[in-house]
Image: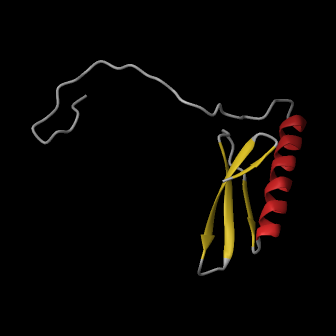
């Protein structure tokens, strides 16, 4: 997990291509980044966030940042099937 300016990025390594692929999490838009080294990855992540914030500013709106944290939700209980699956 990476963080920059309050945004988080998740990273995966593609062994076949030998490259790191990342995606900014917690935003409504799709923001990605990649790099072959950790330094390249960090730079690309920072650049992607900066570009995203500039893009949001240019379109006249704020960034589509979601809220991180816990969400509590209540639901009514429903009977289950014999297989133990919920029936809605």
Q: Which image quadrant: the C terminus?
A: top left
The image position of residue 29, as x and y in percent, is: 69, 43
Q: Position of residue 3 (x, y in %)?
A: 74, 48
Q: How many marks?
A: 0
Which is more toward the observer, 30 or 21?
Answer: 21
**88, above or below 8, in the image:** above
**Coordinates of residue 86 in the picture (x, y in percent):** 23, 33
- Residue in the foreground of this view, choosing between 85 and 1: 1
In this view, the residue farthest toward the left is 82
Indicate the quadrant containing the N terminus: top left, top right, bottom left or bottom right: bottom right
Q: Is residue 17 left or right of residue 85?
A: right
Q: Residue at x 82, y 45 (%)?
A: 52
Q: Quadrant of residue 65?
A: top right
Percent position (x, y) of residue 35?
76, 69
Say which residue appears at 87% left-offset and 30% top-offset: 60
| Of residues 87 and 1, the one drawn nearer to the viewer in this rendering | 1
Identify which residue is drawn at 65% across, 40% down: 26
Please name the residue shown 54% across and 30% down the image: 70
The answer to which quarter of the image holds residue 11 is: bottom right
Apparent side of residue 45 relative to residue 18 in the rendered image (left or right): right
Q: What colouring does the structure picture have?
A: secondary structure
Q: Is residue 81 left or right of residue 42?
A: left
């Amino acid at each position: 997990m990476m963080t920059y300016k309050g945004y988080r990025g998740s990273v995966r390594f593609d062994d076949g291509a030998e490259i790191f692929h990342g995606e900014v999490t917690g935003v409504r838009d799709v923001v990605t980044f990649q790099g072959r080294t950790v330094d390249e990855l960090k730079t690309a992540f920072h650049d992607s966030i900066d570009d995203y914030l500039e893009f949001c500013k240019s379109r006249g709106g704020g960034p589509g940042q979601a809220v991180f944290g816990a969400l509590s939700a209540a639901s009514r209980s429903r009977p289950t099937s014999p297989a133990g699956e919920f029936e809605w």
